[in-house]
Amino acid sequence: MSTNHTAQKFGTAPVFFTAISTILGAILFLRFGYAVGSVGFWGVIFIILLGHAVTIPTAFAISEIATNKRVEGGGEYFIISRSFGLNIGATIGLALFMSQAISVAFYIIAFTEAFEPVFNWVRETYGYHLPRQVVSIPAMLMLSALILKKGANLGVKALYFVVAILFISLILFFLGSTEYSMTSDFNLWNADFKNPDNFFIVFAIIFPAFTGMTAGVGLSGDLKNPSKSIPLGTTAATLIGMIIYFFIVYKLAGSASSEDLVGDQLIMSRIALGGAIVIPLGLAASTISSAIGSVMVAPRTLQALSIDKSFPSKALNKWLAKGRNKDGEPINASLITCAIALVFVALGDVNAVAEIISMFFMLTYGALCLISFLNHFGSSPSYRPSFKSKWLLSLIGFFISIWVMFKINTLYAFSAVVLMSLIYLFINRYHKHRNGLESIFLNSLYQLNRNMQVFLQKAGKRKTREWRPSAICISKDSFERDTAFKLLNWISYKYGFGTYLHRIEGYYSKATYQQSQEELDKLISSFDKIENHVYVDTIISPSYTSAIAQAIQLPGIAGMENNMVIFEFDKEDPERLDLIIENYSLARAGNFDFCILGSSRRKFNYNNNIHVWIKSSDTDNANLMILLSFIIGGHPDWNKADIKIFNICKEHHADETRKKLDELVVSGRLPITNSNIEIIHEQEDVASREIINEKSADAGLTILGFRGETLKHEKSELFKGYDALGNILFINSNSRKDID
């Protein structure tokens, strides 16, 4: 993504030195003593371990992704955007850029603390408290001028010099001693862990030191071989830095009292050999090197964002993407970075800025670990990194990142998530053509679904499961009426599973396939307007029978076998009924429950009740009818409707029938009151159709049962004669269902 390929000339050393100089930088010199004094030796050790539980998985994740494809300009942003997609990449990339730009200010503010002896001398001599901005603002302006004029070449050359000073300072620190260390009996066995309530407050202040491990990744566009330099430089700096931290904490805990550690932010200068000069010099060197590293990285992130047209203004994108002609330096992006940093330098509070940086970096690191984790399960064949992390390590890094964010500051964390969501929605709206997540999420879901399907298939062979509807509905009238789809959606809302197949008549060919895809897109688009819980697809077949034969052999969408087939016909034009009846035996051969929906031109009246009619011949059907009424009634569409059961029986069986229904409702814990159960006596001179037409004329949905033997004799007449009713669901159960 660099605008000038000749700029890609650095090796592994700049990556390592940029990272290690930031890891062993300002926080180490200014706040490690405070941390040891505040939470004790073991408290800081736990902070280091917890912080590296995030940074080590992130370092491995970056190394893994970097060795799979060439990481171009933009470093971490490039990795995120090319894995999660440009819209999410831009959202996180903006947060990343802000954290990098603010880091410049943070290190300049910390650099100013190296002049504390000067500030103390002025205060003691003249009684005047000089503001830190007297040093920090000129320092920021000088750094801005140098980086804008010389670019990354100056930064890399300076790195070697300041890293040398940094390591000399640390060596002299370890060689130094104090009167306290001469008499102290401190050792690992009597080391303490105190003030646990302040643990995450101190963590937030310390964590920016650990974030230095990705500082060198931002140079990716300027590296000869990113796939080699990034893993080697990043991992080495992370592990070496962590080891040095342990020794420094041990040295601090044994060299000064808790009061001195908390009260003197330059306590290291009282411990090191020649500390009065060496430690301020080391602090100045480390902070300037870290500031140089950040001021090199942040503009490249901003430039990469603009090259991907992340901002709504074409002119702004073009201006920010522009590189200097002679060396490709992102001159305009550097100007913006320096301006932002200057604003935060003027604020001048190290601890406040550290907390903001921690929040931004946690968000970025969590995203990188999540990418690595998902790639372990959903990567494409093109994902072949030469360096491989462990999925468990990446998962741990992701969860710890999110957990620590909220532990540091719940309000900040919540605000960050809300802000990122709003930015994503804005970018997603502006860039509609690249809407949605990248294939990594889909691939992961496909793999998860595959494994779940196999597991459920094996589990199903071992034990008997409770019955629940898994229905298929076939219709060629999807664009004329949606009653069948609505029924399937109600069944699938909470307890069941549904597959809706739109039938296209004809033989499979290029033309019918193209037609099927176009009509499927239309159906999905139209069904998306409602809360949809149904899997929608198309089926191409020359006949209704062959379509049914294909459909009933399909595996269940939820991993369980389909057990119900739903057919639909227009009550006012019932020519489809004969075709449905012809295929009754075919569906029953597969032990399917057989349902026929008689669609009315009248719309469903959801405010009216669901009526279930049970006759003496519905021995096997009754329980399925009641269960389906309960399942359908559980959908929000029917939240104002009740279930009402009518049972037509002989007069001398009325008491027994009533008792059985009452027991069924109670034992099955069904939401049906006794007042909604009505027993109707059979009358020889009154047909049951007349009674049903009279009592259910205003029902929202009527459910009736039928027997296979009756169907053979009466054919389509069995479903006619209910002109006063609206939509009717006819049910023929394959077997008696238990209501527990």
Image (cartoon, rainbow, N blue to C red):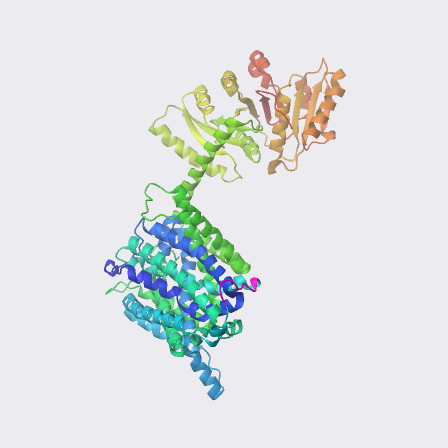
Residue located at (60% from left, 32% from top): 632
Say whether residue 473 is left or right of residue 390: right
Task: Give above or below for 410 relative to 627.
Answer: below
Q: Does the segment drawn in magenta span residue 226?
A: no
Residue that appears at 44% across and 70% down: 344
Tell which of 732 and 474 is nearer to you. 732
- Image coordinates of residue 223 in percent, x first then y, are 28, 58
Of 286 and 701, the residue lying toward us: 286
SS majority, magenta: loop
**Where is residue 314, by image quadrant?**
bottom left
Q: Nearer the viewer, residue 140 or 47?
A: 47
Q: Which residues are magenta?
A: 186-196
Residue 389 as seen in the image, left or right of residue 260:
left
Residue 679 in sight here: no
In percent of width and height, residue 557 lies at: 48, 31
Which image quarter holds the N terminus?
bottom left
Residue 386 horizontal/vertical position (percent): 31, 47
The C terminus - image quarter: top right
Q: Residue furthest top?
A: 713
* Quadrant in the rendering for residue 112: bottom left
> Based on the displayed image, in which of its 4 quarters is residue 247 positioned?
bottom left
**Is 444 above or below relative to 501?**
below
Percent across and percent down for residue 415 are 52, 58
Q: Is residue 192 magenta?
A: yes
Q: How many marks?
A: 0
496 sits to left or right of 277: right
Q: Is residue 721 visible?
A: yes
